[in-house]
Image (cartoon, rainbow, N blue to C red):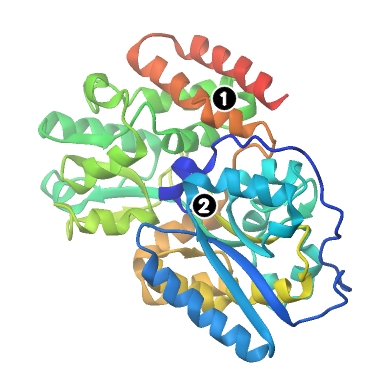
Amino acid sequence: MKLRLVAAAGLALTMAACAPSTSSPTATPSDGGARTGTLKVWLFDEPNRPPKEKVVDAAIAEFTAAHPDTKVDLRYIPVETRAERFKGAFNDPASAPDVVEYGNTDLPEYAAAGGLADVGPVVSTWSEGSALTADAKATATYQGKLLGIPWYVGVRALYYRTDVFAALGLQPPTSIAELTTDARTIHGKRPDLFGLAVGGQYTYAALPFIWDAGGDITSIDSARSRAGLKAYTDLIAPDNCPPQSCADLTGGKTVDLFAGGKAAMGILGNFNRAAVDAGAAKGKYAVVPLPGAKKGSIAPAFAGGNNLGIMRNSRRPALAADFLTLLAGQRYQIRMYDAMGNLPTLKTAGDAVAAKDPFLKPFLATIASGTKFVPLNPGWGKVDSGAVLPTMIEKVATGQATVDQATSDAAKQIKADLG
């Protein structure tokens, strides 16, 4: 899901694991391939919907022109109430839409509820399907089945103040060691600035450190995970980002600090560009990939984003497949980037937007180097909604627990939630 929505993307969904009886789209759909009638589509509402709506309306106009006797019943659903809406649709085929937008971290629970169709056969015959990267497809794959087409992705990289770096004679860091040294140097010489804004409740900033060290969420108490967590929490310190200010710092507050000119560096997403440009940092920053421990390497980033899927109980799967591949195709991914800043998942579309907007290069380089994802397990919602990882980080940042103690506690809860 787009990362401004991803803060809500892992909310626990209480859904009965019931699989509707209709079959998923195949080479011979259950509706016999009929391509007329009314297609029901659910897309997420946005705080700034008009640009998205304009692009989607254009896609609908093209779609209906190519499909006589067809109508599209489009509804924008609030992200905050999606759990209840999807649960109802899974349990009541008569009210279910055909095409849906959903957050990729919601995938395990939706899959466990039996609500999404396998679109692998659709993608395998789609002319643009080969442009989907393996990492992108992984965020829509559950137990070997492709349950959607990744529509857009969001990743984080390192924003830094070019004026501050120039004044202090610093170069953009190319390793975690350099990043840490630069952060402490900046705060030491400019105590009015956090060197690198890092937060105890900013999970998606901490995970790259853990993943780069060879750790993982499901083995959070391993030696490698602990090493990565220590590298991150060591930055929540008086010589960079003091615990009294940063222990409870969230991703949103980190964006505010950097945009407001109160931090020299921040781990922010491509989707945070507008917020930064609206603040004091406008025109005074650049972006590079977040470095890993090895000099010149890139730390793995969390690949958040949204997928487009077909409901398993769709009454018009063939029609749904036609609309799905149109809206998820290169032309409309590019138009969605122009309208909303959504980073394309098709390599061809990504190359096209990068050619006209150099800002995207560090984010695309991050994706190309390899991204990571949350555990594809229906219990992930419990881990996320229970704030297991932020609690672990904050305990270390505030001195309530050592890295070993905090990770041991978190590992027990993760194991219980994932089953």
Badge 2 amino acid: Met
* Residue 217: % across, % down: 59, 29
Badge 1 amino acid: Arg
| Callout count | 2
Q: Are marks 2 and 1 in contact (CB under 8 Å)?
A: no
Mark 2 or 1: the one toward you: 2
Task: For mark 2, give the secondary structure.
Answer: loop
Please determine whether, in this image, residue 225 is positioned above or below residue 104. Answer: above
Q: Residues within 10 Å of mark 1 (few under 14, many from 20)?
A: some
* Residue 169: % across, % down: 16, 46
Q: Of residues 335 and 284, which is closer to you in this image?
A: 335
Q: Of residues 48 and 284, which is closer to you in this image?
A: 48
208 vs 90, left or right, is: left
* Quarter where residue 267 is shown: top left
| Residue beneath the point at 52% across and 23% down | 388
Q: Quadrant of the C terminus?
A: top right
Please determine whether, in this image, residue 254 is positioned above or below residue 77. Answer: above
Please determine whether, in this image, residue 16 is positioned above or below residue 347. Answer: above
398 vs 24, left or right, is: left
| Residue beneath the point at 27% across and 36% down | 196
Please determine whether, in this image, residue 209 is positioned above or below residue 60. Answer: above
Query: Quick one: label 2 or label 1, which is nearer the N terminus?
Result: 2
Mark number, residue 1: 2
Q: Of residues 119 and 217, which is closer to you in this image?
A: 119
| Residue beneath the point at 52% across and 30% down | 385
Task: For mark 1, give the secondary structure.
Answer: helix
* Quarter where residue 270 is shown: bottom left
Mark number, residue 224: 1
- Could one spot residue 19 in this view of the protein? yes
